[in-house]
Amino acid sequence: MNLEEYFARTGYKGSTEKQDLETLTDIFQHHIRAVPFENLSIHCGEKITLELEHVYNKIVQRKRGGWCMENNQLLGWVLKGLGYDTSFLGAYVFNPHQNAYATLMTHLVVKVVIDGKAYIVDGGFGVSYQMWQPMELVSGKDQPQVPGVFRFTEKNGVWYLEKMRRKQYIPNQSFSNSDLLEKNECRKVYMFSLEPQTVEDFRFQCTYLQTSPDSLFTKKSICALQTTHGFRALIGWTFTETTYNYKENMDLVEFVALEDEEVEKTLKEKFNITLERKLVPINIKGSYTI
């Protein structure tokens, strides 16, 4: 495992000398535009493990993506190796269909401290809730980014992340009522405390999320990648591409329904992913919006 090979994977060619916010942001943006958020292992007979060497091999050497426990663990290793002050936190993801936060801590994020200021770095949420810049850990402050306006709110030691989006233009009207579309313009994303966590704290969750019939990740095959203008995603057989700020206060959301034989080709052409085993796409309705 070495940083040069990781940077070759993400295409980052900038400085690694300074442990400042500008360098952190640049490294982070290269990661989210090169490494997909995906759970395809579950749907092609592979097991997701949390050993860093396995994560490194999968993402850096086999050019795959991963979910939060993989992406953010790798990012944490990279930033620590560069001399950043990093730690892991655990979050509880909001479920819009149940209108409640999960009772299980399933989301791993990175906290980075620079010159006494704390930032949340999360390269493992995907789709429109993926931040494009590290977020300053301050309560009640709107933090506008290209994907929309993010905000943290702190109450009694618990931090809540929410995102405000723009209006959406959907040219393919047959998808205008898709359950993948977020109907609310302001959406809760997750909540977390500042209690430090370790990767070990996510062992049970890692197994549960890839085996339980109640898990979102067993119900949907997901692959999402940020682009310079928005993001693209493949959920089951539905390919979608979003362009942020396509018009003033308007995002363009394009949908295409794929045939079975088009899925593999789309993964290669749009996400640069080649699977070693046969993918069985799945998209059971509910509990996930882009």
Image (cartoon, grey):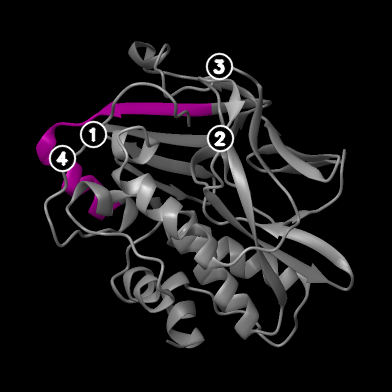
Type of the residue with mark 3: Lys
Quarter of image, res 220: top left
Q: Check whether the beta carbons of the residues at disc 1 and disc 4 lie within 8 A of each other.
A: no
Q: Check whether the beta carbons of the residues at disc 1 and disc 3 lie within 8 A of each other.
A: no
Name the residue that disc number 3 marks: 183
Name the residue that disc number 2 marks: 102
The stretch in magenta equals 252-269
Q: Magenta segment: does it hold 253?
A: yes
Q: Check whether the beta carbons of the residues at disc 3 and disc 4 lie within 8 A of each other.
A: no
Type of the residue with mark 4: Glu
The local secondary structure at tag 4 comes to helix
The local secondary structure at tag 2 comes to loop
- Label 4: few (<14), some (14–19) or many (≥20) C-alpha neighbours in 10 Å: few
Task: State the quadrant of the N terminus.
Answer: bottom left
Disc 3 versus disc 4: nearer the observer: 3
Q: Name the side, left or right, on which 54 lies relative to 133.
A: left
State which tag comes first along the sequence, 1 or 3: 3
- Label 1: few (<14), some (14–19) or many (≥20) C-alpha neighbours in 10 Å: some
* Tally of numbered discs: 4
Q: Residue at x 12, y 35 (%)?
A: 260
State which tag comes first along the sequence, 2 or 4: 2
Q: Check whether the beta carbons of the residues at disc 2 and disc 4 lie within 8 A of each other.
A: no
The local secondary structure at tag 1 comes to loop
Name the residue that disc number 1 marks: 282
Q: Name the side, left or right, on which 146 lies relative to 224.
A: right
State which tag comes first along the sequence, 2 or 1: 2
Type of the residue with mark 1: Ile
